[in-house]
Amino acid sequence: MQPAKQKKYRHDITVENLLIWTYQRQKADLIVERGVGLLPQEKGADGIFYKNISGDGTYQVQRNAELGTRIDCFGFPSAEIHPDAEFVHELIKANIFTHLERGLLIDFGKTGLVPDWLPGAKPEIRPVYRKNGKPKMIYADRDRTKPIACEIEIVMSQDHIDFKRRIYRQWWGALDKLCLELWKGDAQVTSYNVQPPAVACTPWVGKSE
């Protein structure tokens, strides 16, 4: 698919930074999912479950801490969210993403942490040592007089390395899918020219490890 047209009045942003903006700055999941800023009647109309709790105000304090602001629930400005952030969050919730992809995208948006692909990792097996520092041996006889091998433990398996890198590739694939979806129609986001992932799809390829 061809990239969306670049509009001069929009700011360039990578899809990674768009996610971080959506979930760290705009807190889209907290506002959209919980109906923050909506009156009880509006929550009911949107199918958002709620109930009045904490008569001493503890719940209100907790919610304010989560959002980093106080929501007054009156008028349009309450819990105002940028339409681009709301659109991104609703798009991620759509059926085009698997549960794993959705979780990887939202977790990255909230933390900014790239899935660990274990740079430089190699399969590693090492001897098991006793408390006195000597190798723990396997013996061929009950009297333990004929050692035949040293006990070993797996420190890093190839299966574990492959698993971590599969997760990274799925995360990258979800980023790329989100970017392509945002390019469709060339009109979904109003403030940003969304750029492809800045990180490599398989950063371990071609590296001497």
Image (cartoon, grey):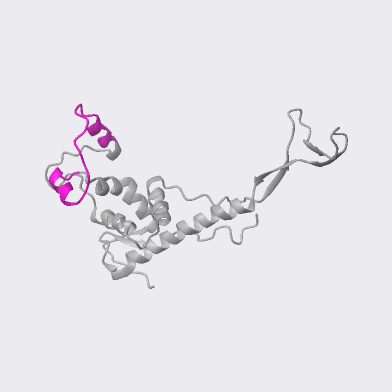
Considering only vertical position in the picture, is 88 above or below 76? below
Residue drawn at point x = 42 percent, y = 47 percent? 112
Task: Judge from the rendering whether residue 111 lies leftward or rightward of residue 63; answer left or right.
Answer: right
Q: In which quarter of the image is residue 185?
A: bottom left
Q: Closest to the observer: 52 or 142?
A: 142
Q: Closest to the observer: 44 or 16?
A: 44
Quarter in which the N terminus is drawn? bottom left
Considering only vertical position in the picture, is 133 above or below 89? above
Residue at the farthest right position: 145
Q: Residue 4, position in %: x, y?
A: 33, 69
Residue drawn at point x = 67 percent, y = 50 percent? 123
Residue drawn at point x = 47 percent, y = 50 percent? 114
Residue at the farthest front position: 142
Task: Judge from the rendering whether residue 170 lies leftward or rightward of residue 125; answer left or right.
Answer: left
Q: Residue 205, position in %: x, y?
A: 59, 61
Q: Residue 33, position in %: x, y?
A: 27, 48
Residue drawn at point x = 22 percent, y = 44 percent? 36
Q: Residue 159, position in %: x, y?
A: 61, 53
Task: Judge from the rendering whether residue 94 lies leftward or rightward of residue 122; answer left or right.
Answer: left
Image label count: 0
Q: Closest to the observer: 129 or 18?
A: 129
Quarter in which the C terminus is drawn? bottom right
Q: Closest to the observer: 56 or 116?
A: 56
Q: What stretch is highlighted in magenta?
A: 37-65
Considering only vertical position in the picture, is 31 above or below 1? above
Q: Is residue 57 magenta?
A: yes
Q: Quadrant of residue 89?
A: bottom left
